[in-house]
Image (cartoon, rainbow, N blue to C red):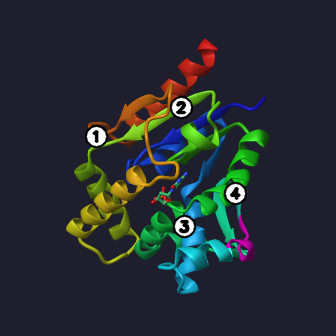
Amino acid sequence: MPISVAVDGPVGAGKSTIARAAAARLGFVYCDTGALYRAVGLYCVRQEIIDDKDKIEECLDDISVSLRIVNGYQKVYLNGDDVSAEIRFPAISMAASTVSAIPAVRNALLGIQRKIAEENDVIMDGRDIGTVVLPDADVKIFLTAKAEIRAERRYTELRKKGVKTTYEQVLDDLKRRDYNDTHRAAAPLRLAEGAKLADTSELDFEQSVDLICGIIEDTVNAE
Ligand code: DC
């Protein structure tokens, strides 16, 4: 049976960069499940139906979302088109948060995620991986950091990509998404049973990767 590692946590905790580096170090596939919600969000923004829950539910049959690993990097496809770059725009972050609160959207994306874990040693990051998607994951980690620190990191990342924004805007957006993600009725973000808490507020990137790899190795070796 392949080994599965669930990494959940709030926006901007560094889940994707830390989990990707840990996966590369340990020889696991890395899967960023937020990209799936972002792809659905992008479709709804393009169709101008993001404010209409019924239409979002109806359009699910018209959407095909898939993940592929190309040269070690995850690419996200929406109806056959590579949308990996477009889904990272801030407007799509909020759209992803909106669609992710709809149970039909979550159900539609469940099979894709479970199949990846059935076929690969995987580190999968998201909000509900340890609670819903892979409740029997071999290792569960809740990765977090203080909101201000997460906002600072995300702001620096967006600036590097040339996205025009302010720290205050990023912090505000992050707090709103934290609220949405933890208060929604469908699979809210919470600490999964048996999850280890990893707070990276005081850690740099390498230290965070060391922490995650240490938790994974200790847990797998103890089994
Ligand atoms: O991790 P991210 O910022 O790319 O995620 C985008 C949105 O998708 C975020 O608001 C929460 C949601 N999401 C989710 O509900 N469940 C997941 N497994 C992953 C992301």
Magenta segment = 60-65
Tell me the amino acid under the disc marked 4: Asn
Circle 2 residue: 140
Question: Which of label 4 and label 2 is nearer to you?
Answer: 2
| C-alpha span from label 4 to label 2 | 27 Å
Tell me the amino acid under the disc marked 3: Arg
Can residue 85 be seen here?
Answer: no
Can residue 107 be seen here?
Answer: yes
x and y percent of residue 132 in the render? 59, 42
Q: Residue at x 33, y 40 (%)?
A: 204
Tell me the amino acid under the disc marked 2: Lys
Circle 4 residue: 71
Q: Which of disc 4 and disc 1 is earlier in sequence?
A: 4
SS for tag 4? loop
Question: Which of label 3 and label 1 is nearer to you?
Answer: 3
Ligand 1 has an atom within 8 Å of the beta carbon of the residue at disc 1:
no
Q: Residue at x 31, y 65 (%)?
A: 173
Q: Which quarter of the figure has residue 23?
A: top right
Q: Residues within 10 Å of mark 3 (few under 14, many from 20)?
A: many
User: Viewer-proximal residue, 223 or 191?
Assistant: 191
Q: Which of disc 2 and disc 4 is earlier in sequence?
A: 4
| C-alpha span from label 1 to label 4 | 31 Å
Q: Is residue 213 above or below residue 116?
A: above
x and y percent of residue 149 in the render? 26, 49
Q: Residues within 10 Å of mark 4 (few under 14, many from 20)?
A: few
Q: Which of disc 2 and disc 3 is earlier in sequence?
A: 3
Q: Residue at x 62, y 50 (%)?
A: 31
Circle 3 residue: 38
User: Which numbered disc covers residue 201?
Assistant: 1
User: Viewer-proximal residue, 42 or 100?
Assistant: 100
Question: Which of label 1 and label 4 is nearer to you?
Answer: 1
Q: Is residue 121 magenta?
A: no
